[in-house]
Amino acid sequence: ADHPFAGSRLLLLDSPGNIHSISFLFKSLTNTYFDVFATLPPILPPGAVGILGFGAGSTARLMLELYPDLIIHGWELDPSVVAVGREYFGLEKLEKQYPNRIFISIGNGLKASIRNGFAGILVDLFSKGSLIPELQEPSTWHKLRKSLRKGGRIMVNVGGSCVEAEDEGRNGKMVMEETLKAMHRVFGDKLFVLNLGNRKDDDSSLALTGELAVPDRDAWKKALPRSLKGYVDMWAPYQG
């Protein structure tokens, strides 16, 4: 009963059993990177948000509840994951509750696009317990940047030591560092990193693109509920 995930429903994928979605019966926040994802909309221009690697809808659920005007387009490669989300994670209810605000496509998220571009993109693309190899290629980030409208941003779950891959050769921290290097080649000094790990061997990080000056942070915090404000000050410039 005292476990952080007590009372939750978890979607575990890959042989190591990495968590891909989480849902609590009596609360929306998860105390995981999904909550950090939910902080993105206040620093975006008007427009829809794309979720690449939709999973069972953990991020979408939070964002739809927090931002009444937000429209979400999600891409998920595996239709069975979406089916599980609808049956066990409340996704079907979410789609009925917000029929004009959430749209889910089955397919490759790296090919996602909408008319006039995304205001923001959330990237959560893993396969076999590791960030997909395409995310270690600068060309992927060039393409994703082109799918943004002016002022748009990308936030990415880049994993870390906490991610256990099926292939022992794809060390979680090493893949994270390669992904950040690829992003840095495209976004330069407009790249920030947030670390959620409490110990060096329990590393879990996210990346964010775009400007992030002090006034921007203050306005960002004012637009967030108190439970999420603390994440704003955790972002630090990527050091390489």
Image (tube, grey):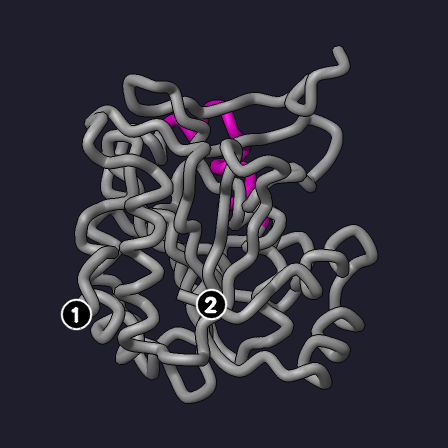
Q: Is residue 94 a member of the stretch shown in magenta?
A: yes
Label ID, residue 238: 2
Instruction: Give the CA separation, mark 2 to mark 1.
Output: 19 Å
Q: Amino acid at mark 1?
A: Ser
Q: Nearer the viewer, residue 57 or 229?
A: 229
Badge 1: few (under 14), some or many (20 or more) residues near its Cα, within 10 Å? some
Residue on which disc 1 sits: 139
Q: Residues within 10 Å of mark 2 (few under 14, many from 20)?
A: some
Q: Residue at x 52, y 29 (%)?
A: 89
In x, y percent, where is residue 72? 46, 60
In this rendering, is residue 231 above or below 212?
Answer: above
Image location (x, y in percent) of residue 201: 50, 32
* Magenta stretch secondary structure, dominant: helix
Tell me the element at label 1.
Answer: helix
Total number of numbered discs in the rendering: 2
- Tags 2 and 1 in contact by the CB under 8 Å rule? no
Amino acid type, callout 2: Tyr
Q: Earlier in the sequence, mark 2 or mark 1?
A: 1
The residue segment tinted magenta is 84-97
